[in-house]
Image: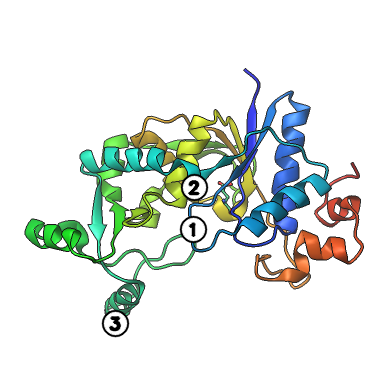
């Protein structure tokens, strides 16, 4: 079976130099190994995904000289598949509804921090501080049937107890140069959100399901997702999904050393194109040889 690579952008902004690097590394690794290259549109967030951004993804990738297989998988068209996985996790007693709003969580964290430092996840966000996991069954049932929005959170401790130790093969490097066999540490993320009342999935859940359904064997992506791989391995373990090989690459930074963001238009591929740069200029900016 040929190896299968993918590039999986979210259509919530214009692609920048960092996306160009991920996309080109995947595309060229597929070509060099006689493998397949897939494009997947990660548009589960209906409020932030836009058709014009999706159209721009196709245009920018084609301009870079990238070609992909059809049909393109759009996650918004497969919500029922993710919903079934959520049900499986629910039936296994591994998720619970949490009703706190973002503001409630900020307040709870501030309360905890009055007693001392509260743990943060690898992205620097405080771990879920609430007590919804141990909520009284009647109170929970009443809230579920009310209009209250909720997030379904993974009981990470129970999930880790179920799967046992997990690892992944890292062919690139983590932010501190980690490479080789990596021990997954999903507990560092606390009880992550796997779905919401109005959206039966999350980035973490749909990414592992799609990688498995599409037969993805190699995931090449930015180092910002390196530690998310721990959560991905845990979900793969719980849902009996195979683990691809992972290769995380250093992030492209701006001239001040800052991470690029979709909201800074100066480094978007279309702004650079409009300024007269060629696809080869882009390759040079991200350290790739001329095509
Ligand atoms: N959709 C994610 C993003 O836009 C990338 C997913 C992945 O490569 O695992 O950052």
Q: Residue at x 27, y 80 (%)?
A: 111
List the residue tagged with mark 2: 76
* SS type, badge 3: helix
Q: Residue at x 55, y 49 (%)?
A: 42
Above or below for 119 versus 86: below
User: In x, y percent, where is residue 205?
Assistant: 42, 45
Image side of residue 65 versus residue 263, left or right:
right
Image side of residue 200 versus residue 208, left or right:
left
Mark yes or no: residue 111 visible. Answer: yes
Contact between labelled residues 2 and 1, with CB atoms less than 8 Å apart: yes
User: In x, y percent, where is residue 154?
Assistant: 30, 50
* SS type, badge 2: helix
Front position in the image: 211 or 166: 211
Does label 1 or label 2 sit earlier along the sequence? 1
Front position in the image: 214 or 249: 214
Q: Residue at x 76, y 37 (%)?
A: 67
User: In x, y percent, where is residue 34?
Assistant: 74, 23
Total numbered labels: 3
Mark yes or no: residue 92 visible. Answer: no
Q: Residue at x 23, y 65 (%)?
A: 147
- The residues tagged by marks 3 and 2 sit, at their Cα atoms, a distance apart of 41 Å
Label 2 Cα neighbours within 10 Å, binned few <14 / some 14-19 / many ≥20: some
Does label 3 or label 2 sit earlier along the sequence? 2
List the residue tagged with mark 1: 46
Quadrant location of the C terminus? top right
Label 1 Cα neighbours within 10 Å, binned few <14 / some 14-19 / many ≥20: few
- The residues tagged by marks 1 and 3 sit, at their Cα atoms, a distance apart of 37 Å
List the residue tagged with mark 3: 114
């Amino acid at each position: 079976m040929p190896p299968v690579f993918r590039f999986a952008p979210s259509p919530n902004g214009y692609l920048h130099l960092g996306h160009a690097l991920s996309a080109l590394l995947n595309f060229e690794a597929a070509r060099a190994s006689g493998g397949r290259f897939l494009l997947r549109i990660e548009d589960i967030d209906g409020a932030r995904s836009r058709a014009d951004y999706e159209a721009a993804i196709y245009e920018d990738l084609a301009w870079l000289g990238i070609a992909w297989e059809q049909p393109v998988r759009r996650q918004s068209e497969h919500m029922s598949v993710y919903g079934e996985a959520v049900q499986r996790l629910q039936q296994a007693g591994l998720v619970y509804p949490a009703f706190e709003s973002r503001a409630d969580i900020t307040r709870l964290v501030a309360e905890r921090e009055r007693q001392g430092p509260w743990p943060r996840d690898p992205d620097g966000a405080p771990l879920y501080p609430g007590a919804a996991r141990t909520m009284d069954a009647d109170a929970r049932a009443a809230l579920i049937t009310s209009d209250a929005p909720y997030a379904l959170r993974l009981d990470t401790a129970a999930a880790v107890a179920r799967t046992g130790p997990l690892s992944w093969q890292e062919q690139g490097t983590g932010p501190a140069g980690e490479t080789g066999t990596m021990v997954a540490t999903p507990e560092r993320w606390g009880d992550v959100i796997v779905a919401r009342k109005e959206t039966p999935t999350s980035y973490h859940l749909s990414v592992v399901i799609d990688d498995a359904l599409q037969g993805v064997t190699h995931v090449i992506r930015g180092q910002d997702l390196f530690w998310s791989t721990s959560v991905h391995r845990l979900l793969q373990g719980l849902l009996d999904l195979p683990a691809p090989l992972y290769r995380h690459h250093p992030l492209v930074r701006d001239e001040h050393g800052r991470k690029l963001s979709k909201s800074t238009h100066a480094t978007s591929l279309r702004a650079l194109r409009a300024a007269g740069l060629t696809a080869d200029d882009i390759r040079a900016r991200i350290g790739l040889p001329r095509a």
